[in-house]
Image: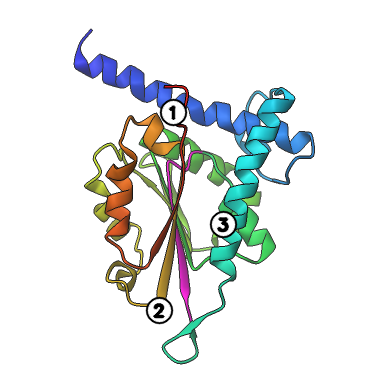
């Protein structure tokens, strides 16, 4: 088997975890563990998960949601009366619907950026374009490209990348239009980085991406990774 074929199969395997995760989230929603009015739009074949799977997904969702609210609810001011511009960078975002939920809750940050393989972002871009419930939350000036796997609006961006090449992180921040003041750590901008089973799925060391993130002195890194079984 050539290296290219092996790499392609590995990519497909990693991307398939997105479909599995989305089906599991929908199972949780249907059983009343959590609320998500949009996940059903991303699932073609609903599945009924066992209670232990439902509870595991709920625990993860609840933990991340608590941390996310803590970040978004900080009501500090900077530069006189100017509010802090909150930014969220979601690595390996898959079909996550957090941005749309935050819009409904009135908690959406100034900028929400999602990153994943182009094969995943292309599908997500197509679904966002298809469903008005999602598309209408992006504003009239939003542009959606299924071919490029990109969605660009004033406060939400979906960007394709292969983050096994960690050096692309700087490029993503630039392409996504994240405020450069955040990069240099100026206190008028604050950022939160989310990643769930990201380093594990791509066979990265947890420090590979986290060290890059730590370069930005005003960022918070929320990381959830599998550690066992080996």
Q: Is residue 7 left or right of residue 187?
A: left
Q: Is residue 18 left or right of residue 49?
A: left
- As drawn, 41 above or below 49: below
Q: Which disc number belongs to residue 188?
A: 2
Give the CA separation, mark 1 to mark 3.
26 Å
Q: How does the figure colour the protein chain or chains? A: rainbow
Q: Nearer the viewer, mark 1 or mark 3?
A: 3
Q: Position of residue 151 (x, y in %)?
A: 44, 51
Q: Residue furthest bottom?
A: 80
Quadrant for residue 119, please give it: top left
- The residue at which mark 3 appears reads as 67
User: What residue appears at the point 45 percent right and 31 percent down from the top-left corner?
Assistant: 227
- The residue at which mark 1 appears reads as 15
Q: Is residue 123 visible?
A: yes
* Stretch in magenta: 83-94
Label 3 neighbour load within 10 Å: few <14, some 14-19, many 20+: some
User: What residue appears at the point 33 percent right and 29 percent down from the top-left corner?
Assistant: 203
Badge 3 element: helix
């Amino acid at each position: 088997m050539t290296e290219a074929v092996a790499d392609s199969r590995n990519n497909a395997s990693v991307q398939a975890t997105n479909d599995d995760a989305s089906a599991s989230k929908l199972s949780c929603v249907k059983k009343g563990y959590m609320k998500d009015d949009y996940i059903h739009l991303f699932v073609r074949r609903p599945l009924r998960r066992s209670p232990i799977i439902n509870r595991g997904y709920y625990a993860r969702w609840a933990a991340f949601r608590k941390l996310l609210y803590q970040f978004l609810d900080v009501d500090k001011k900077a530069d006189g009366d100017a509010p802090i511009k909150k930014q969220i960078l979601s690595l390996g975002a898959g079909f996550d619907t957090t941005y749309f939920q935050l819009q409904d809750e009135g908690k959406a940050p100034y900028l929400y950026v999602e990153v994943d393989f182009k094969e995943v972002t292309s599908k997500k871009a197509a679904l966002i374009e298809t469903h008005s419930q999602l598309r209408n939350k992006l504003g009239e000036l939003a542009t959606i490209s299924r071919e490029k796997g990109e969605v660009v609006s004033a406060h939400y961006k979906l960007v394709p990348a292969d983050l096994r090449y960690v050096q692309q992180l700087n490029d993503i921040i630039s392409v996504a239009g994240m405020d450069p003041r955040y990069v240099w750590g100026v206190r008028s901008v604050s950022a939160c980085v989310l990643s769930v089973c990201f380093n594990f799925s791509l066979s990265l060391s947890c420090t590979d991406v986290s060290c890059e993130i730590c370069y930005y002195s005003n960022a918070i890194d929320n990381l959830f990774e599998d550690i066992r079984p080996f």
